[in-house]
Image (spheres, helix red, strand yellow):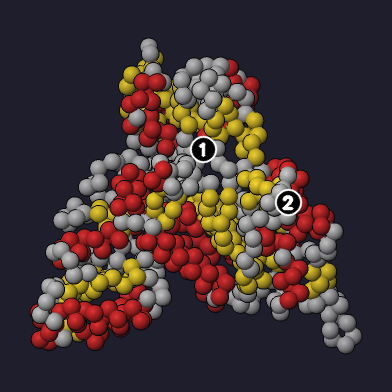
Amino acid sequence: MTDSNPSSPTSSSGDKPMDAIMALCKRRGFIFQASDIYGGINGFWDYGPLGAQMKKNLREAWWQDMILNPCWGRKGPNGDRVRCVPVETRIIQHPKVWEASGHVGGFNDPMVDDKETKQRFRADHLQGLYQAGGFGEPLAEMLARAASAQGVVPLCTVVASTSGEAVDQLVKTRKLQKDLGIRAITARAPLTDAARMFVDVEIGNVKACCEVLAVPMPTLKDRAGEVPSPFTGKKGALTEPRQFNLMFKTIVGATGTEDDAAYLRPETAQGIFVQFKNVVDTTRVKIPFGIGNTGTSFRNEVTPRNFTFRSREFEQAELEFFCHPDESQAWYAFWRDFRMEWWKSIGLAGDNLILREHDKDELSHYSCGTSDVEYRFPFTSPGFGELEGIAHRGDYDLTQHQKHSGVKLDYFDTTRGETLPNGSRKGERYLPHCIEPAAGLDRGVLALICEAYTVDPSRPSPELMKFHPRIAPIKAAVFPLMDKEGMPDVAEKLYDDLFAAFGKTGFIEMDAKQSIGKRYARMDEAGCPYCFTIDGDTLKDQTVTVRDRDTGKQERIALDRVNGFLTEKVGA
């Protein structure tokens, strides 16, 4: 986020003002703070009428393209059509599920406490200002001899999930500057690779060009007494990092005790693994195939931030695709590429979306490979934030659940093994490998909102949302130019026709109040792609004015062509 002027031209999502996006979300009923009238509750968000429908559209697009017609009917690496089936599993599972999955023992984040203020934050979110060169020194010369952050104590620190967010806080928050003793700070233009962030600062008697980097974990462990607090600026106020489990604990039963403790699920995936055998035994699916699950998950984030990006309650859409170990790498590449293509197809095409392969030191201990679909959110710019992870999980999960439950979860594959004299196969028994495309629906909605948010200063009302028609919560609007002379009757009939054709995928609005310009502006902010206006000429020649949201252009079409026009542009 580098520009707080909502009238500025916006293309890259990194240039878009997050405060203006959040204001529009509340004003138009996309997203509200949960428990808003009581001051809200941190880390929880509610969806208003438009946001709820938009999220439903995103969920159903995933369901259609991953379950009902997987990968748009294309064939996988084995030459056959991709096959997937759905399940719906519970938020609360048996506690042993989470012991087997490793969540009870290993689902932790390293946390740091400020001993004076009692505030707690994730250790990997501590960003530091490291002196990199002389004050005002040309960037090219300074980069040639910039100091490494490893083992070097920062001049000051701030809590932020990315370096870009840290710079934004430092430059814009006067109180923070005062608390940290910053007399002046100016951000330098980011490098072309968008990987490094620099600021010119004056801290006390120090004038320097500083690089903003995450404080390395070894520094927090070995030199905690020297690292400045992000809240008071004092050294020695921070504890060493300690592990903090992220699962929500609950009690099952009206008279339950600690012996009846359970957990709200931190992911939907484990419900799929524990039902793998039941799905195989009760359906005709054969390896390779996928099992999909959508639903709410919970993570007790210590520092939820950045609107709905990091919440304590969120919705996921996950697929576990089971395949033979010999074919798993090919399926991993297949799903990695398709998921990137899918996000592009619903409105995220462009430089704001990337596919990033994890380095070896980032991989989970069981992972044979992981890629993230990442989006450049305004609060991560010039960096990116995770939208979806595609992980090659091997046979880790089925192995763990088989071990802890004592139930055999291996698969007998009649299409493999040596060929017998009668022409049949001997068959092979094995634990399938699993490829997991795991998407966040809340993050998906947020990315689509950020991408769609557009400012056009030439319009009387400059803000509009350029949603892909498949995702747009309002598919069309019908406006009688005046509330008289038979126009409302024609508008009512057109509304009924459009609702019958398109009402299953979104709202059809009809509005006769205020000037036509204000009605267009409302629909622009709501992301409605097309508005149809009934005027005096409609009663004479049976034509209507159709207005395009993205271009603002208007044309006349026959009244009886409206349904076909909208089908062509939006889909049924």
Q: How many marks?
A: 2
Tell me the residue that label 1 is attached to.
Answer: 303
Q: Note whether residue 502 is visible.
A: yes
For label 1, the SS is loop
Tell me the residue that label 2 is attached to.
Answer: 95
Residue at the right extreme of this rendering: 421
Give the amino acid type for the residue marked by disc 1 in the picture.
Answer: Thr
- The one nearer the camera, 460 or 138, is 460
User: Disc 2 versus disc 1: distance between alpha carbons?
Assistant: 26 Å
Which residue is painted at 41% across and 75% down in the image? 504
Q: Position of residue 223 (x, y in %)?
A: 60, 19
Q: Note whether residue 435 is visible.
A: no
Quarter holding the C terminus is: bottom left
Which residue is painted at 56% across and 75% down in the image? 68
- The one nearer the camera, 127 or 35, is 35
How packed is label 1: few (under 14 Cα within 10 Å), some, or many (20 or more)?
some
In the rendered view, would you say 138 is above or below 285?
above
Q: Which mark is residue 103?
A: none
Which residue is painted at 52% across and 16% down in the image? 235
In the rendered view, would you say 141 is above or below 96?
above
Q: Position of residue 105 (x, y in %)?
A: 72, 42
Q: Position of residue 135 (x, y in %)?
A: 35, 20
Q: Quadrant of residue 94?
A: bottom right
Q: Is residue 23 left or right of residue 543?
A: right
* CB under 8 Å between discs 2 and 1: no
Give the amino acid type for the residue marked by disc 2 in the picture.
Answer: Pro
